[in-house]
């Protein structure tokens, strides 16, 4: 159920204020095995530093940050990187789609992605791209949401425990 879940875009000041809560989401996801650029153990200081950098990127207009909140607690997030080369003003890179383990299976990720589509349209972005672990739940989510699978790169990244994982690349035209 998602009646008490809100999904919204946060601006620069609010992004900075959300750093602690976003670090909680990141640590939870990495501890749950999410391959999102971090290895185990993920020190809290490293998670906080990452989100401070994201907040700085939001302040500079380089990133869009959305959060999902349930009963006032941040339970999910997704970003769109909009600071891209001059020949790609129509594109956005989707990054760090995360939902806490205790908030999954409630359509929160689906709502985050739908809200990101809306923001992308409002920002004049007509092509979105992303990558995800091959065979994971997120891959199925993106396919159901109309994303087109481009292909798979074996051994593209590491899981948080150090094992190799393949990565599937997707795009979506809005």
Image (tube, helix red, strand yellow):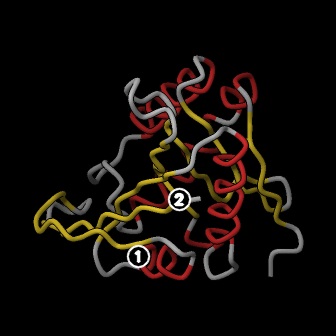
Please, what secondary structure does the residue beneath circle 1 have? helix
Cα separation, mark 1 vs mark 2, equals 13 Å
- Judging depth in this view, the residue of 77 and 21 nearest the camera is 77
Q: Give left or right: position of 86 versus 12.
A: left
Check the image and report above or below for 129 versus 85.
below
Total numbered circles: 2
Image x and y of residue 155, in percent: 10, 64
The earlier-in-sequence mark between 1 and 2 is 2
Image x and y of residue 75, in percent: 67, 59
Image x and y of residue 127, in percent: 49, 51
Check the image and report above or below for 131 versus 59.
below
User: Residue placed farthest to the right in the image?
Assistant: 3
Residue 66's tag is none
Q: Quadrant of residue 167?
A: bottom left
Q: Residue at x 81, y 75 (%)?
A: 2
Q: Quadrant of residue 43?
A: top left
Q: Residue at x 36, y 54 (%)?
A: 36
* Camera-side mark, 1 or 2: 1
Mark 2 lies on residue: 98
Image x and y of residue 128, in percent: 48, 53
Q: Residue at x 56, y 50 (%)?
A: 126
Q: Quadrant of the N terminus?
A: bottom right
Mark 1 lies on residue: 139
């Amino acid at each position: 159920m998602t009646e008490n879940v809100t999904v919204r875009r946060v601006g620069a000041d609010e992004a900075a204020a959300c750093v602690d809560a976003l670090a909680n989401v990141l640590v939870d996801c990495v501890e749950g095995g999410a391959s999102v650029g971090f290895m185990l153990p993920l020190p809290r200081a490293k998670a906080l530093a990452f989100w401070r950098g994201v907040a700085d990127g939001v302040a500079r207009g380089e990133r869009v940050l959305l959060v999902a909140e349930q009963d006032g607690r941040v339970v999910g997030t997704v970003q769109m990187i909009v600071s891209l080369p001059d020949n790609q003003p129509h594109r956005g890179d989707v990054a760090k789609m995360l939902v806490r383990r205790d908030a999954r299976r409630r359509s929160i990720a689906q709502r985050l992605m739908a809200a990101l589509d809306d923001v992308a349209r409002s920002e004049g972005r007509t092509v979105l791209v992303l990558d995800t672990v091959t065979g994971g739940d997120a891959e199925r989510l993106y396919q159901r949401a109309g994303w087109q699978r481009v292909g798979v790169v074996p051994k593209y990244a590491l899981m948080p425990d150090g094992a190799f994982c393949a990565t599937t690349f997707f795009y979506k035209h809005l």
